[in-house]
Amino acid sequence: MQQQNDDEGPAEAARDQKENRNGADPGVHKHHSFFSFNRQKINFSFWYFLVMLAALIVINQLVSKPAEQTVEFSVFKENIRTGKIKRVEITDKYITGYPYTRQELDSAQKASPQKIKSLESETVFRTVPVGDPSFIPLLDSLHVQYFAEPQSKNSLLSLVLTWIVPFVLMIILWQVLFSRVGKLGSGVMAFGQNKAQLVAEGDTKTTFADVAGADEAKEELAELVDFLRTPQKYTAIGGKIPKGVLLVGPPGTGKTLMARAVAGEAHVPFFRINGAEFVELFVGVGASRVRDLFRQAREKAPCIIFIDELDAIGKTRLPGVVGANDEREQTLNQLLVEMDGFDGRVGVIILAATNRPEVLDAALLRPGRFDRQVVIDKPDLSGRKAILLLHVKDVTLGPSVDLDAVARATAGLSGADLANIVNEAALFAVRNGRAAVTQMDFEEAIEKSMAGLQKKSRLVNKQEREIVAYHETGHAVTAALTPGSDPVQKITIVPRGVAALGYTMQTPTEDRYLLTRDELISKIDVLLGGRAAEQLVFGRVSTGAANDLVKATDIARRMITEFGMSEKFENVVLQSQRGAGYLGEALALGQNREYAETTQQYVDEQVARIIRERYAAVSGLLEKQLDKLKTIAARLLEKESIGADEFKTMLEATVSSGA
């Protein structure tokens, strides 16, 4: 089955350095940190401290001692006479009377916890000694237990256990809770503060030398760097640098890396935040964070604000839509106001990145806001080689490695894909016990990236292996005999990925940006070659061609609706839905169209006609080359994989013997 190149996710820049809380040393500052030097935060923390201290005092008063009743000395003596006090504690300042004896307390402890609580819940009387000489004889006469305690007994230990230990424990608990809440970014006291990570001047080590395959974009952004370094050159003649620059391109092409390189070249502070981090559950939080971000940026000017995934907050505002996200729209409105409100001469430049520029609000893209759009597209052949050279600097390569061949085999891949292929090749070399990466490792890494992991444990019965072998051979023979097709690089029936039981890899000889009608037809022919071979050899077809048919039908439909290659609607575009920029998804939820039902019927009939005619042509081609098909399929069943050279040799040998 033909191999399709898919994009991986965007290349992420290296993580920022550790947080610097004192603001003196360079480093990364997370402005939502609870213990930052902000006057409002200090006041807020102080009030919480007072509340905690008051709660601690109340708790000590309520639970540290049993209930006590302070009475006059005469009443205290009367309670002794009436039996309400059975045990007396005498200190320098107080005389305390307990309604139970020591023996009663010991027996209660042996009995049950409920008995102890019952005794301790009774009222304890306390009075101030007055130096009555008859007090001790009174206790002796009534057989009341009494004892004396010095006032200084364990005073320091009591202070530590009663006040200091609980206070320290509450501070530790408070610190742990708020540090975790701060990491989650949803702390009550950090709602209105932006979550941008600030990389201090000089800490951004990334430069333009670390970015490859985007020379035009680097030249465009070099002007921003020059302005941040020497703004007087532009302000002296009244020139203004663009306030905002929008980096657009497919995922993984290095938009974030390019923004970091601009900051590294200019040697200015770099604020980085994701568009989704502005928006929270509560209305008004996003707008507050935008205000806080721009306030801090003005204080750090000249600097760069980088908003990644701008489409998270910058989508077009649709009037009258029920259930619209008011919080996101308020955040967008505040961003528009802030971009209008600051003077471009202060040296605050906004960089933003998105792979969905078509969904952005028009107010964001007008002059005065994001004045300039810089496209960072997938690299061409020379760009891919430059990216590979950048990533293999720290990799030990064997003498057989040909990076030119790797670059040709990775057409359509992004910088992130290429970085992953280099890493996978190094891992394959280590896994196989090699000290250097070979060309074979790169080939295996490319296949894994494009087709998925090799499924050696997947068992395929003999009949299915034959069907897959003839199917893939049909693709390869059709590609080799069809003018305008890309050369066959490899044929294999080794299962890979989720559902691929085999595939045919074709490597373009050069990057192509335009295709003629004949070249589109040749692509359809190659896609239909697998099913035609099955039908020719076995007299029946299988579900193995499902993905091929989807691609072939899509090409045929686009020829009629997008490329104007139909007889009835020549040079007319019929498609009403545009793809979602670099993600290739439809924006509209429904299948709305701007043409009549009869036109849709015509499109369906023409698509079916093209597929039917090309299938018949491919079947006729393979029928004439049936000997080649069987010979190559038999070899494929024997070896499971056939390379480009062997396939070419077998094809030419079969042609010679047939002649």
Image: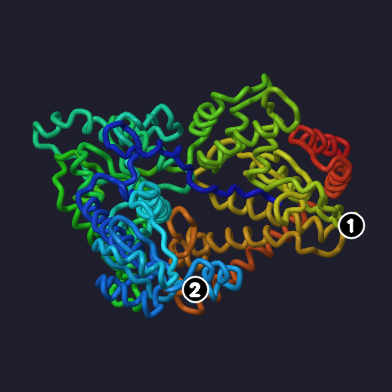
Whole-percent x, y for residue 115 in the image? 54, 75
Which one is nearer the viewer's eye here, 82 or 489? 82
Please give left or right for residue 655 compared with residue 167 in the image. right
Position of residue 263 relative to residue 564, above or below, is: above
The answer, for residue 357, to whether it is visible in the render is: no
Residue 51 visible somewhere in the drawing: yes
Residue 323 placement (x, y as % from top left): 36, 76
At label 1, which amino acid type do we have? Gln
Name which quarter of the figure residue 190 lies in. Answer: bottom left
Furthest toward the left, the residue is 237
For this orientation, the residue located farthest to the top is 399
Q: Is residue 26 left or right of residue 448?
A: left
> What element does badge 2 sit on?
helix
Residue 325, placed above or below residue 398: below
Task: Bin the neighbour count of mark 1 within 10 Å (Cα to Cα): few under 14, some 14-19, many 20 and up.
Answer: few
Q: Gap in Å between the C-alphas at discs 1 and 2? A: 83 Å
**Numbered tag placed on residue 463 in the rendering:** 1
Q: Nearer the viewer, residue 53 or 175?
A: 53
Mark 2 crowdedness (10 Å alpha carbons): few <14, some 14-19, many ≥20: few
| 1 vs 2, front mark | 2
Q: Residue, x 22% and y 59% (percent of image)?
A: 334
Q: Kindly identify which residue carries mark 2.
A: 117
Using the rendered view, name the quadrant where residue 184 is placed: bottom left
What residue is at 79 percent from the left and 63 percent from the top?
Answer: 542
